[in-house]
Image (cartoon, grey):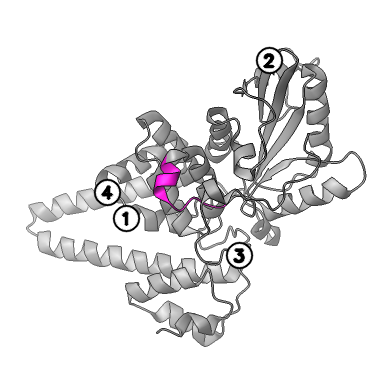
Amino acid sequence: MNDGVHGRRRHPQRAGGVGGSDRRLRSKLSDRGLDLFSTDLQHGAARAERVCVAAGTLHQGTLELFRHDPWLAFDLLGVERPVVGTPIDRRAEVERNNPKRAGQVLSNFPDLVLVHEDGTRGVVICVEAQGKLDLKKRWLLPYYQAALAKDHKLPTWIVVVSYCDRVSEQLAAWKVGHPPAVNVLLLDAHTVAPILDVKRGQAWPTAAVLGAALHGCRGNLEAARAGLQSILKLPNERRDSYRATLWAALPKPMQALLKEEMTVEQREEIWDVERRSGAFSYGHEEGLEAGREEGLEAGREEGLEVGLEVGLEEGQRVGRRTTLVELILTVLEVRGVALQTNEVAQIRGCDRLETLERWAKLAREVNAGGQLFEQG
């Protein structure tokens, strides 16, 4: 059994390196539209300290990665696999019926339970995906471990995928605090490096998607791009599923930038992902797209092709400029880099897309606003 939180280990041989300075950005669900989900899940100042993993695409997709790759946490953290074999999903076997309500299942067990039994040997792995701090987990995680160990009479490990710094910090505190100790294998943006090499990502797609989601939700465009490219050659069903998981983790300005880099076919696939998710934002975007198509058709009928094409091109340029400006300001804000009034005005007043793209990359590395403008 592991008796500590694997808080800072990495497995660079398989995970690849981190591009540039990747500080501990706290995800910001801001009024600029950097929501990870279409519904308004969080309000108030505290929302800057957590990413919400809803019981939806990102949450279920994260668990799916472990169904497909049960040893993912062990391999990412460089922890030796305790047994030979492939644990399988046995969650249904540990659910408990509610004695007060017939047909209802009590939800006192983890998100996913994987079990491998081989005579007297075996292992139980329970997986939790957390996007916001839930103090009840202080008591539930040890309970999960004890109850599953009792049921299966096997070594039992807890894996926590944390999309939130506060969750990770509390897990470290619960390890050394008063009993019962909380001992987990922790996968977060500080223990899992993104796979930036596409060939490595293609060889290990589950790790590529998880790393891209953990870092993409914090503003790492390079990690998100590499993750999406790593799954392109997967069978259609799995590719679509992994893409939906990763896409659900990304802030909307990043989604907009990545869409511009995609082929028409890839954009259609993303729109299918959004349509299936039932996101409100999709309805808005689909309406805009339909409006554009109707406008273009009307323009053709009225002989306004040139004007419409010019207008569409200008609209796309303005939209990209706005997205880049908001992305730069938000990344600097959540990293705690203060900007002078004149510096904010300089960013908002810039019309050169090449300059804004360069500043967007630098925003993840600079320690002062003035450093952003040193190269013009």
Q: Position of residue 121 (x, y in %)?
A: 73, 19
Q: Residue at x 72, y 50 (%)?
A: 7
Where residue 118 is drawn, which disc sits there?
A: 2
**Residue identifier under label 4:** 263
Where residue 287 is drawn, which disc sits there?
A: none
Q: Quadrant of residue 144?
A: top right
Look at the image and tell me in which quarter the N terminus lies.
top right
Asked if the residue under mark 1 is in contact with the one under mark 4, i.e. CB atoms within 8 Å, the reply is no
Please give left or right for residue 3 compared with residue 299 in the image.
Answer: right
Q: Residue at x 8, y 56 (%)?
A: 302
Label 4 and label 3: CA atoms lie apart by 32 Å
Magenta residues, start to end: 193-202
**Residue identifier under label 1:** 261
Comparing marks 1 and 2, which lies closer to the viewer? 2
Asked if the residue under mark 2 is in contact with the one under mark 1, i.e. CB atoms within 8 Å, the reply is no
Please give left or right for residue 275 compared with residue 371 in the image.
Answer: left
Question: Circle 4 — which element?
Answer: loop
Q: Position of residue 320 (x, y in %)?
A: 35, 65
Q: Position of residue 43 (x, y in %)?
A: 65, 55
Comparing marks 2 and 4, which lies closer to the viewer? 2
Of residues 192 and 30, the one drawn nearer to the viewer in this rendering: 192
Label 1 and label 2: CA atoms lie apart by 48 Å
Looking at numbered disc 4 in the image, what kind of residue is underneath it? Answer: Thr
**Residue identifier under label 3:** 23
Comparing marks 1 and 3, which lies closer to the viewer? 3
Label 1 and label 3: CA atoms lie apart by 26 Å
